[in-house]
Amino acid sequence: MKTPSLFLLMSALYMPYSHAAEADSSPWQSELSLGLQQLSGNADSQTVNGEVNGQYDGEQTRYQASASVLQVEKDGEEDKRKTELETQANRDISARSYVLLNATYVADRYGPYFDDFMLATGLGHQWWQSDTLSLSTEVGPGYRYQRPNLDEIDDDDLIMPYSVREPVIRAQAKGEWQLVDSVRLEGRSIVISGASNTSVEGAVTLASTITEKLSIKITSKHNYMTDVPPGLKNHDSVLTLGLRYQWL
């Protein structure tokens, strides 16, 4: 019988920052999330996830960048290692609309593509913006390059054994809802459609504030691909639990 134990690891998170009055007026925002899950018993497994986000909000321009890492070990052997990088620049063209440039790179050691890069542009619109609720959508053309992970092709591997170079359409919907003062709900859905495949990614995060800068968060992320090898599922999901620290 398995005896699960769950540990959250949080260390070395202090970063120098200015006085609170200055921080409130700063256009910079940044945060760090860390989580560790460890199971022991008949089978041992360990999951480590980390994410860094940064944002600059100017009068007419906004810049965002994020990096995340997920690593899973089972019985002493690595089972999953995934790194995701994303950056985006927005330029306002009206009170609620903006043009954008987005770049995304995913390196997935055990996923369908070892390298997955996309560059996209488009238009975004802020449908709602208040202290408690925000909702925005984006759509536009792009181009993606995907290199298959040919080293990992087994009967149960979600690997498409061909390289992809194609134009795509990218669409995104994003929302945030401050349920109460200490609880925040965040959601994001991205659709990328090309001739080879259409992928849908959705993520929902529930964050509960512990202190002014520290919160605990639970994230459920789901991925769906229209074209997968025979016998494999189109849907994949991951649930992560961690601590979020905002230092700016």
Image (spheres, rainbow, N blue to C red):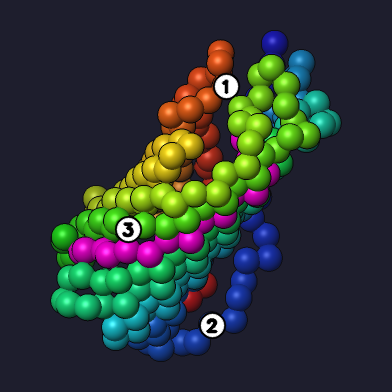
Find residue 140 and name its label.
3
Answer left or right for 62 relative to 148: left
- Which residue is denoted by mark 1 in the rendering? 229
Q: What span is in magenta?
A: 112-126
Mark 3 or mark 2: which comes first in sequence? 2
Is residue 185 visible in this depiction of the protein? yes
Most foreground residue, 99 or 40 = 99
128 to 26, vertically: above or below: above
Q: Secondary structure at mark 2?
A: loop
The residue that appears at 27% across and 65% down in the rendered structure is 123
Answer left or right for 162 relative to 151: left
Mark 3 or mark 1: which comes first in sequence? 3
| Front: mark 2 or 1 | 1
Q: Secondary structure at mark 3?
A: strand
Answer left or right for 134 relative to 23: left
127 to 234, vertically: above or below: below
Quadrant including the N terminus: top right
The residue that appears at 68% across and 65% down in the rendered structure is 12
User: Residue 86's x, y, as percent?
Assistant: 52, 61
179 to 32, vertically: above or below: above
- Which residue is denoted by mark 2 in the rendering? 17
